[in-house]
Image: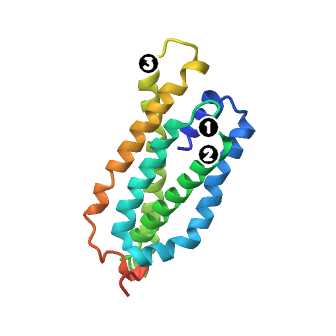
């Protein structure tokens, strides 16, 4: 998303760089607000249900960006960006908390180093994969890049949203009580 959204806003919709930056701001605001709410959500639903459900919702919001076209109301774009920020933040917070749920204090430093490296790799792979998906769809464009970019970007959002939603199955293997010592789910 940090790669595709600026492309959509600037090249697909024609916004300037600073306008595209402003359209990204609701994601940051939502991420901050979600940090306050995530503990309550995890306590109520547990890690398994939150991660499965939120992954599907996150995939849905990613795919919904395929509906953003030139002339789309800015309020709708901001609302979608806000929703995407909420779901992304809940995903990262939940996964970060679950990773350290059963790590002893003695192993916390090593686990933190490994997890930080894995997180940076996953972000890098996310940008690489999204650029490959866009490049795949761009290969069939025969018009100028400015006018021909919106269709491939929309298809990329649909593919990446579907892949994200389908990845919810990876969290379905969690047991309902996994991470309960951190979330206090069921307490």
Q: Position of residue 127 (x, y in %)?
A: 49, 40
Q: Earlier in the sequence, mark 2 or mark 1?
A: 1
Secondary structure found at label 1 = helix
The residue sitting at 63% across, 56% down in the picture is 28
Q: Position of residue 134 (x, y in %)?
A: 46, 29
The label shown at residue 76 is 2
* Rendered view: 118 above or below 95: above
Q: Which residue bears the numbered disc 1?
A: 6
Is there a contact, CB below 8 Å, between mark 3 and mark 2? no
Residue 97 as seen in the image, left or right of residue 178:
right
| Residue at the outermost bottom position | 187
- Mark 3–mark 2 Cα distance, whole angstroms, equals 30 Å
Residue 48 as seen in the image, left or right of residue 3:
left
Q: Which residue bears the numbered disc 3?
A: 139
Of badges 3 and 2, nearer the viewer stands: 2
- Mark 3–mark 1 Cα distance, whole angstroms, equals 20 Å
Sort mark 3 into few (<14), some (14-19) or many (20+) by Cα contacts within 10 Å.
few
């Amino acid at each position: 998303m940090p790669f595709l959204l600026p492309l959509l806003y600037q090249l697909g919709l024609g916004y300037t760089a600073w306008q595209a930056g402003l359209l990204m701001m609701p994601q940051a605001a939502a991420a901050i607000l979600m940090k306050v709410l995530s503990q309550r959500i995890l306590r109520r639903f547990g890690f398994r249900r939150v991660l499965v459900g939120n992954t599907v919702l996150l995939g849905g919001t990613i795919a919904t960006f395929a509906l953003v076209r030139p002339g789309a109301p800015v309020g709708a774009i901001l609302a979608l960006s806000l929703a995407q920020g909420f779901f992304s933040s809940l995903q990262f917070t939940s996964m970060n908390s679950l990773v350290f749920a059963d790590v002893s204090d003695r192993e916390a430093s090593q686990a933190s180093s490994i997890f930080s490296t894995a997180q940076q790799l996953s972000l890098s792979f996310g940008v690489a994969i999204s650029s490959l998906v866009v490049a795949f769809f761009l290969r069939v464009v025969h018009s100028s890049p400015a006018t021909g970019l919106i269709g491939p970007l929309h298809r990329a959002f649909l593919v990446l949203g579907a892949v994200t939603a389908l990845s919810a199955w990876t969290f379905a293997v969690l047991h309902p009580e996994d991470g309960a010592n951190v979330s206090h789910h069921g307490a």
